[in-house]
Amino acid sequence: MRLTEDQKMIQELARNFAEAELAPIAAQIDQEERIPKEIIEKMAEIGFTGLNVPEEYGGSGLDTVCKVLIIQELAKHCASTAEVISVHTLANWIFIHYGNEEQKKKYLTAAVEGKIGAFALTEPGAGSDASAAKTKAIADGDDYVINGNKCFISNMGPNEGDYVVVIALTQPELGTKGMSAIVVDRNTPGFTIGKREEKMGIRGADISELIFEDCRVPKTNLIGKEGEGFKIAMQALDHGRIGMAAQALGIADAAIEASIKYMGERVQFGKPIGKLQGLQWYLADMGTRQEAARALVMEAAQAADDGEPLSKLAAMCKYCASESGVWIVNKALQIHGGYGYMRDYPIERMYRDARIVPIYEGTSEIQKVVISREMMK
Ligand code: CAA
């Protein structure tokens, strides 16, 4: 897909930001397991926390293609930061498409200013089977009283997270048709952020458990209608999966670039290892898989912008880019040999970061369920 001049400008803005602000501290972010607050502030200043927020709420009003370009550039240098923006953009999407005017004014404006949103669907007993979620939000007068536990929730933890869209049962007897989307602010009594997970990769990003114990929120916190929560979650995930695919592309781009550089520098058997045909073939396979994945991600992004049916393409692009991303980074590590395994080279971090993408926002196996169901419709 050919980019427009505007899209190229956004890509360059993201590239310049990532090279100047993320590249120098990406290893530190990984080691210290936190993204400095200033990074979020700077991303708010250049319009990235409000990237998909309409201009009337102060946002950048960018399309999905631009979202992909931004997340890709961020992920090239810091997958943790890319993950925060991708999930935050998913939360924005819910307010943009289902929020009422008051909610849009409050949460979209906050997003633009650099407040970070989260999305809570997963529970200890409801991962791939999202329909098994048990968290309840029972009506009581003008309030909902929320009880339950969410786990593996991105963008909520000691460093990040100002509000979270929680998918909870308002009418438990109706199953997925009784689920609703309710926004909960960080400091609401009865809402506690539990254990921050110690992760293999994307270590800079907060992923935590959320505990709701008689957490009371006004009914005005309902997003959309009662009973729409599961549909909202599935549609939001269709869009979110394109963001995660972009994250995989960015990590793989960085791994390919690092491999080309290393193949030119590293001398074995009296010549740069780039002269060895076996490694040239690795590189050719890496590049070909990457460009095939990129074409599919861009196709899905364009479909999202054109308002076309998205589930199948979003699942395909996430499945393809995340699996090829892992494959590419693995080969890149192999090209780097022993050095690739050491922390002195960023390949080791890329390998750990890439590994989450075929898991979160729906495993590859779930993407294949979605794809085949859509194909058989
Ligand atoms: N858009 C709109 N509606 C949808 C939909 C979509 N993409 N997908 C399903 N629905 C609707 C269906 O039409 C159906 O409604 P009707 O009964 O009215 O027809 C209803 O939702 C139930 O759908 P299914 O019968 O297909 O539901 P299911 O139980 O078979 O599950 C699933 C479908 C695809 C497996 C789903 O459970 C799923 O996507 N699982 C993976 C969950 C996931 O991605 N979790 C990640 C959480 S976020 C995260 O990873 C952390 C992070 O923050 C990064």
Image: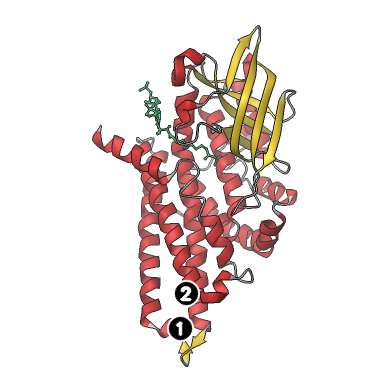
The extreme left residue here reads 376
Residue 353 visible? The answer is yes
Residue at horizontal 65 percent and vertical 16 percent from the top: 145
Which mark, by number, is residue 273?
1
Which mark, by number, is residue 335?
2
Q: Is mark 1 on a helix, strand or loop?
A: helix
Residue 54 visible? The answer is no
Q: What residue type is labelled 1?
A: Ile
Image quadrant in which the C terminus is located:
top left
- Residue in the foreground of this view, choosing between 103 and 139: 139
Q: Distance between the residues labelled 2 and 1?
A: 9 Å
Q: What residue type is labelled 2?
A: Ile
Quadrant containing ligand 1? top left
Marks 1 and 2: in contact by CB < 8 Å? yes
- Residue in the foreground of this view, choosing between 349 and 290: 349
Q: Counting other residues with Cα less than 10 Å from the Cα at mark 1, is it few (<14), some (14-19), or many (20 or more)?
A: many
